[in-house]
Amino acid sequence: SNMATSVAIVKLPGEFSIDRQEAMRSGKIESLEINLLQPLRAICELGEPLHCIGPSKNPAILKTITINHDVGRYNGLHIDNWDQLDLDSRHRATNRICINIGQDDRYLLFLPISLMEIASVLSKEMGPEWEAPARFTLIGRQFMELFPELPIIRRRLAPGEAYVAPTENLVHDGSSGGQSHVGEQFTIRGHIRLL
């Protein structure tokens, strides 16, 4: 499948025990290798360059969870820009695997159309004078304003489940709606391909 446009949900092989969760929370390299990376390699190829972003937490019952620390506000549905690639190169960007290491279900929200497809639709709709905004998240916003009827997909991730998604080419966010505990996840960026 095409990593630049596919979203997959996978379950981490093996029992998702309290010990394993603790090992992932600790972020220690040796225990991550055994508890996370080895099991992941059984189901996917972790292509270089591989960046362990590591464990992160967010409060429960948030509609969207990504916060912009520069302005102290939630981003809402957005596009990642770790790789700083231009629009025409987004299909070459890294994707990510994000594992739910918390105690409750969490959710991935996304638009079922890639950023590159969105830009192509917008340029057809808006005509030749349309120029892609420099901030790619704004391309997603323009599209959602133009096509408010297009549904946002909300996919549940149980503890021990992960999404693999091209977050540099996908309008997305996480959600902790309905949780009673702090949301916790572990994120790895790379060229990740399901086996």
Image (cartoon, grey):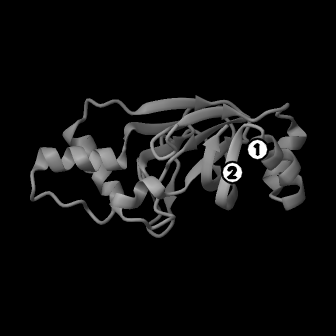
- The residues bearing labels 2 and 1 have C-alpha atoms spaced at a distance of 7 Å
Name which residue lies at 44% across and 39% down: 110
Neighbours of disc 2 within 10 Å: few (<14), some (14-19), many (20+)? many
Residue 86, image quadrant: bottom left
Write down the residue under mark 2. Answer: 46
Identify the residue at image location x=79%, y=49%: 37
Specify the quadrant that holds the C terminus: top right
Query: Which x, y percent locates residue 53?
Result: 66, 60
Residue at point 51% right, 66% down?
Answer: 69
Q: Position of residue 30 (x, y in %)?
A: 89, 58
Q: Secondary structure at mark 2?
A: strand
Picture coordinates of residue 97 (x, y %)? 63, 46
Kindly tell me whether residue 150 is visible in this rendering: yes
Q: What amino acid type is highlighted by mark number 1? A: Arg
Q: Nearer the viewer, residue 20 or 183?
A: 20
Between residues 165 and 101, which one lies in front from this camera angle?
165
Tag of residue 60: none
Of marks 2 and 1, which one's residue comes earlier in the chain? Answer: 1
Q: Please name the residue that numbered disc 1 is placed on.
A: 41
CB-based contact (under 8 Å), mark 2 and mark 1 = yes
